[in-house]
Every structure is written in structure tokens, then in C-alpha cells.
Amino acid sequence: VDINDVELIAAHQPATDKQQQDVTVQVQIALQQLPENQRSAIVLCYYQDMTNREAANVLNISVSALESLMARGRRKLKKILQTQSDDLLGEI
């Protein structure tokens, strides 16, 4: 899944305010830092609203492998976003 797909999806979602736009940008930046397979799993399930089975079929992997990729990807995203947050707070 190309990261540009995520940007296009985010561009079509109405942002309620500047803070929401900032969060969207930070998540996009964090997604770019994930390994391709983890990013693809997350994008297919969360941004393209596929079921785990559908996403696993697209990626040609088992559902359990997809769930493992998503779990690792979510953990890594959490760390990346926490670091970004800490860095931003340190600049204030």
C-alpha cells in the first residue's frame, strides 16, 4: 500500500479543526516510518475499512499473520507518536 493512498484518504476526510489536521499529519508521518508490511496491514484495515480476512487476502498472508503485523505496527506507531509528542512538548 502506497503512503500516498493514506494521504489521499486523509485529504477526503473533513478536518474539524487545526488540531485534528495536525494529528492526521503526525499519524501520516509515523505510518511512513513503519515497515511496508505493517503499514499495509494498518492502512488496509483502518483506512480502507477492510476486514482482517479481506486484508489478509490482499496481502496474500494468513489472518493470524495479518493480526501479528497489525499488533506490531500499532505498538511501533504508539512509540513513534509518543516520541513525536515528547519532542513537540520539549520545544515549548
Image (cartoon, rainbow, N blue to C red):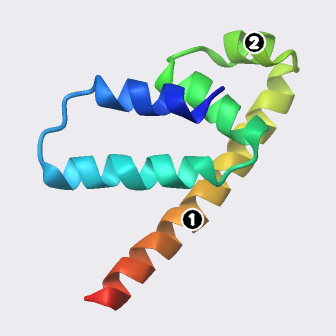
Residue drawn at x 27%, y 26% as measured from the top left: 13
Residue positioned most to the front: 4
Q: Amino acid at mark 2?
A: Val
Asked whether, in this view, residue 69 is left or right of residue 5, the answer is right
* Dot 2 and dot 1 residues touching (CB under 8 Å): no
Badge 1: few (under 14), some or many (20 or more) residues near its Cα, within 10 Å? some
Q: Position of residue 78 (x, y in %)?
A: 55, 60
> Residue at point 87% right, 20% down?
62
Q: Nearer the viewer, residue 51 or 7?
A: 7
Nearer to us in this view, 67 or 2: 2
Residue denoted by label 1: 80
83 to 4, vertically: above or below: below
Q: Relative to 91, does residue 80 appear above or below in the rendering?
A: above
Q: Is residue 38 above or below residue 56?
A: below
Mark 1: amino acid? Ile
Q: Residues within 10 Å of mark 2 (few under 14, many from 20)?
A: few
Which mark, by number, is residue 58? 2
Q: Quadrant of the C terminus?
A: bottom left
The residues bearing labels 2 and 1 have C-alpha atoms spaced at a distance of 26 Å
Q: Position of residue 7 (x, y in %)?
A: 43, 33
x and y percent of residue 67 in the render?
75, 33
- The residue drawn where x is 75% and y is 47% is 35
